[in-house]
Amino acid sequence: MNNMRLPPWDITALSPWEISQAMTLLLRRLDTIEAHCDGGFPLFSRDGQYWKTSTGGSWMGGFWAGCWGLRALISKSTADRDKALALCATLADKLDIDTLNRSMIFWYGPALCGRWLVDHTAQELANQAAAVIASGFDQRLGYIPLGCAMGGGADGGQRLSVDSLAATVQLLGGAGHEPLNTIARAHADALIDACFTANGACGAEAKSELQHTSNQYVLQRVDRPGGWSRGQAWAMLGLCHAARRWGSPYLDYARAACVYWRRSRRTPYPADRPERSDSLSDPSATLIAAIAILSLSELLDDGDSWRAYAAQQIAALIRSSYFVRRDGAAHAGAFIGACYRTSAAGCELVESPWSSFFLLEALCMLAGLIDGEEQGTQSHSMNPADD
């Protein structure tokens, strides 16, 4: 991989000033979003001003809490800390919702905020969530099904989804209880067996069907491997964290998935569905992929070249029109780069709390403020109100 030719869109990595400025804009943006949401959780905005909101945050609530957790980690502000932890506490009513996407709610919210802000109440809530989610492991199926809530559908009890793999691996694997770690690994293995292919492409979903002749469930992939850019990125992120937690053979799977990304996504703005000529771009997929690669790079002998590649990808997004980087502009700090299904009519490019979180996290990783385990690595203070 060290000799791979860089495609023509590759540009220099962000300077320390560019990283700091982008972080400042993103952190200030949180106040603007909150003002537009009138106390609700933000879900998405098409124009950076009018927001679709939710009283409970849906599956995105943890990312909104995580945004404030990162801001508190950076600013060392008591007010920011209190805001992040209050949002985490609000998420407690999601403990019993029938969806594996709870793992994203409780990992990116209470688990990370508890870790970054050293708060035992948030950490305990995350541990509760890990136990409840693990209790949903279905011995007949061999994995934790997606569930019927939050869009899972009537057959959600037999569906396996890649989106929450990274959060599930980290939330259950990091709870400190070996039985939960074992469940997390079995869940990851089921997804790999059903969805991963030898060339590194990964399907985003599989479904179990009962075979009446044997009275056993058979798990089969239901989509084309690599056919959804964000699905491939979610797989990369999950496999990279599996590699960090369990080593081989997950390290080989993670590397293969990342190699496939580099070969199949030749620009930082890949099509959401590459096989469709009318597909929108999805810069947020590149963002998730870049975070996965940054995390993986810490495990590889040639990690410097992988880190350089990820840094170039993030730089391309920051310098693109998807990110409003002009200080003083009406929507400064808005990342309108998430391809998201806003209605039955189809997908749109929107600003969302999860894509803003990942952009801020990526910048924090480049700045050395958090590492591939999402641990805080050094003391740092940046007042979001300062230039």
Image: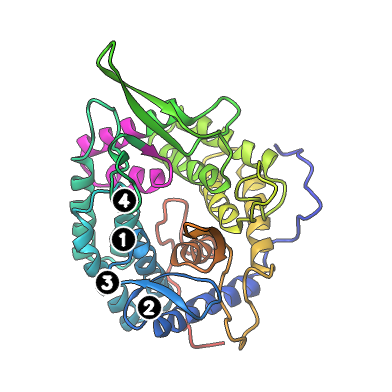
Amino acid type assigned to the residue bearing label 4 in the image:
Ser
- Mark 1 or mark 3, whichever is nearer to me: 3
- Kindly report the distance in space between the C-alpha atoms of the residues bearing marks 3 and 4: 17 Å
Please tell me whether residue 28 is drawn above or below residue 361 in the rendered image: below
Report which quarter residue 224 is drawn in: top right
Of pointers 2 and 1, the one earlier in the residue sequence: 2
Amino acid type assigned to the residue bearing label 2 in the image:
Lys
Residue at x-position 64% and y-position 75%: 17
Of pointers 1 and 3, the one earlier in the residue sequence: 3
Q: Position of residue 300 (x, y in %)?
A: 56, 39
Viewer can see residue 246: yes
Which one is in front, 121 or 283? 283
Q: Are marks 3 and 4 in contact (CB under 8 Å)?
A: no
Q: Which residue is mark 1?
A: 115
Residue at x-position 24% and y-position 56%: 126
The secondary structure that most of the magenta stretch takes on is helix
Q: Which residue is mark 2?
A: 76
Q: Which residue is mark 3?
A: 85
Secondary structure under tag 2 reads loop
Of pointers 3 and 4, the one earlier in the residue sequence: 3
* Rendered-image quadrant of the N terminus: top right
- Kindly report the distance in space between the C-alpha atoms of the residues bearing marks 2 and 1: 14 Å
Residue 75 part of the magenta segment: no
Which segment is the magenta one? 160-187
Amino acid type assigned to the residue bearing label 1 in the image:
Arg
Crowding around mark 4 (Cα neighbors within 10 Å: few <14, some 14 to 19, many 20+) is: many
Secondary structure under tag 4 reads helix
Determine the residue located farthest toward the front in the rendered image.
345
